Amino acid sequence: MPHLEELLQAPLSELTDRFLERCQPVPRGFLEALEADRRQGARSLAGKIRARQEKNRSEGQRLRHLLRYELELWTQGMERVAGVDEAGMAPLAGPVVAAAAILPKNYRLKGLDDSKKILDEERREELAVAIKRDAVAWAVGVAEVEEIDRINIYHAGLQAMRRAVQGLVRVPEYALVDARTIPECPCPQKGIIHGDALSMSIAAASIIAKTTRDRMMSALDAQYPGYGLASHKGYPTPQHFQAIKEKGVLPIHRRSFGPVREALGLVPLQAELFPPPPSDPPEP
């Protein structure tokens, strides 16, 4: 690393590239020297670097906070902690998909969060690739439309979660689940309300589940063109309602869902046939 005096003689474009674009370590005293520089560009660069450092500190604190459930289990000697979440409970069409992910101990991935908070589809895909690359193990479980209609969406979601956990190549020692209790789970588990926003493992599972289901719906869009499945992913949007009205109900539509039954001219299902799901487990 050049001496500070030599470094300050470099063009601002070079300094910007090194310390802002490529995020190289900032030498001691460098920012103070930039802030005292007579050049407005130098002082502006110092402000941008400090803003980036503060953002990085905030992200580090957020990621440490996301690991609090995992840290508690790791300190008890349980290193294989699986996060479990699902995607696709509300759509009118397509499967419900769950994922389970065991992250390495003390894992941190910048930007990892609940998939619903990440609106950029490309960014979700990037995170999914990184999670799958880094995870100790990950797996997905699926419940198709026929099963959803047979046992109802709530229990189909649980089945998908169970299949995801059972699909892991490493048996987890504990599972952190987004607000559920998985039937026939091969390990102890804890349901955490809003767990996809509170646990890094569950957030990782939510990303894998969401991106996996989105790709499935895009494939179905190619099979059933004109319904907009690649854009709305089967959710009850005005575009989707209009397509059903104009083109009819598809085999992948959930016939246990009210709008689909209405489009088919069927009477609503009796409440006792599809009782409301049990209350979410209390957060410990």
Image (spheres, grey):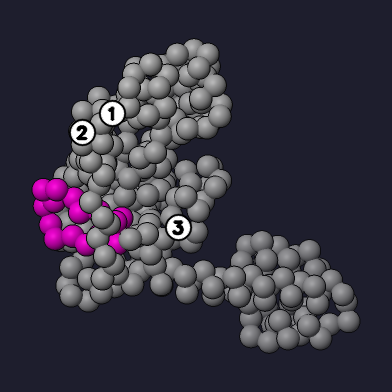
Q: Amino acid at mark 1?
A: Leu
Q: Which mark is residue 113?
A: 3
Query: Residue 41 lies in what quarter of the image?
Result: bottom right
Residue 81 visible in the displayed image: no
| 188 within the magenta span | yes
Q: Earlier in the sequence, mark 2 or mark 3?
A: 3
Q: Quadrant of the C terminus?
A: bottom left
- Residue, x 27% and y 57% (percent of image)? 280
Mark 1, residue position: 269
Given residues 233 and 49, the one toward you in this image is 233
The vertical placement of 161 against 2, above or below, is above
- Residue, x 77% and y 80% (percent of image)? 34
Relative side of 63 to 23, left or right? left
Relative side of 11 to 72, left or right? right
Distance of mark 2 from mark 3, alpha carbons? 36 Å
Can you tell which of label 2 and label 3 is closer to the viewer? Answer: 2
Relative side of 49 to 60, left or right? right
Residue 3: x, y in percent? Answer: 69, 83
Secondary structure under the numbered disc 1 in the rendered image: loop
Residues tagged 1 and 2 counted as in contact (Cβ below 8 A): yes
Secondary structure under the numbered disc 3 in the rendered image: loop
Q: Which residues are magenta?
A: 178-192
Q: Amino acid at mark 3?
A: Asp
